[in-house]
């Protein structure tokens, strides 16, 4: 049996983790749909540079990204200083710092499936839509988005799951403040460091369940997508 203190601690960390993951996913959805469409259609000469920047978190060690964000968000940097002057609080060791770091770190997991879904759309369908008198907004709303729903859903699931499992970035930016920055992955690390293995096992179980549900959902989604294609 776990003490009420441990139960409350795990519950608070779970709620904070879900809050961070849901907020990150919603913001990334708003950013990634127009960005993914631009990446799928543009021939701009700077497109490879933008693609490399978007993809960078996939190959960059989380601690490296976390270090540079820690410097960027610190009050000694213009960005961090501007945040302090406007909101009278620091980005470092705050939920909003975690949120901004999570958005940057999970961006490619949302953008890539959406961009790939846009690329697969038959150009003849877009031409037919314009021929029938639909403007760009109508074509995007009634044709492009429905045809890309599987890619958009996959991006949301991957971004959500990736945010749930973050460690290096959130540790460097947020530290370990209860109810503010102590998400499940940080709580697990803290419990292991203090040799509280029974409680650590419970936190690890929660994270494993999250991962299993996400993978199961993706598997069902892909099966439905293949069935629809057939």
Image (cartoon, rainbow, N blue to C red):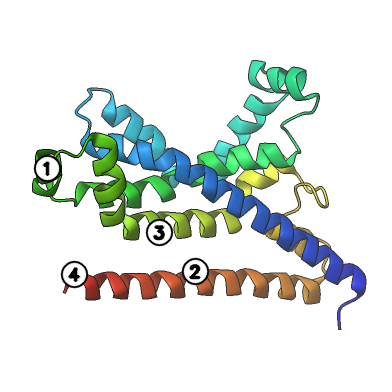
Q: Do the residues labelled 1 and 2 touch (CB within 8 Å)?
A: no
| Position of 230 relative to 26 (above/below) | below
Q: Which residue is at a point 70% across and 60% down the rendered structure image?
A: 184
Q: Say which of 218 and 143 sits in front.
A: 143
Q: Which residue is at a point 8% across and 47% down the rendered structure image?
A: 124
Q: Which residue is at a point 53% across and 48% down the rendered structure image?
A: 26
| Position of 148 relative to 40 (above/below) | below
Give whichever of discs 1 and 2 has the lower sequence position.
Answer: 1
For the N terminus, which image quadrant? bottom right
Q: Which mark is residue 153?
A: 3
Q: Do the residues labelled 4 and 2 touch (CB within 8 Å)?
A: no
Q: Name the residue under label 1.
A: 132
Give whichever of discs 3 and 1 has the lower sequence position.
Answer: 1
| Position of 220 relative to 67 (above/below) | below
Q: Which residue lies furthest to the front in this view?
A: 133
Residue 10 point in image, percent of width and height: 78, 66
Q: Which mark is residue 214?
A: 2
Q: Which residue is at a point 38% across and 42% down the rendered structure image?
A: 33
Give whichever of discs 1 and 4 has the lower sequence position.
Answer: 1
Q: Say which of 227 and 109 sits in front.
A: 227
Residue 230 point in image, percent of width and height: 16, 74
């Amino acid at each position: 049996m776990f003490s009420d203190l441990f139960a409350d601690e795990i519950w608070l960390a779970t709620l904070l983790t879900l809050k961070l993951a849901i907020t990150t996913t919603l913001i990334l959805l708003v950013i990634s749909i127009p960005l993914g469409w631009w990446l799928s259609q543009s021939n701009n000469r700077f497109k490879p540079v933008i693609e490399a920047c978007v993809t960078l978190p996939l190959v960059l060690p989380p601690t490296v990204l976390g270090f540079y964000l820690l410097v960027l968000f610190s009050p000694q940097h213009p960005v961090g200083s501007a945040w302090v002057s406007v909101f009278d609080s620091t980005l470092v060791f705050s939920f909003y710092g975690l949120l901004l770091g999570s958005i940057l770190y999970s961006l490619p997991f949302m953008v890539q499936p959406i961009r790939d879904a846009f690329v697969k759309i038959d150009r003849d369908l877009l031409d037919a839509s314009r021929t029938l008198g639909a403007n760009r907004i109508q074509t995007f709303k009634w044709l492009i988005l429905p045809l890309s729903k599987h890619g958009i859903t996959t991006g949301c699931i991957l971004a959500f799951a990736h945010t749930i499992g973050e460690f290096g970035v959130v540790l460097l930016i947020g530290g370990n403040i209860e109810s503010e920055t102590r998400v499940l992955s940080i709580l697990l690390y803290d419990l292991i460091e203090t040799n509280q293995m029974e409680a650590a096992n419970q936190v690890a179980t929660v994270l494993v369940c999250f991962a299993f549900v996400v993978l199961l959902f993706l598997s069902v989604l892909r099966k439905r997508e293949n069935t629809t294609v057939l």
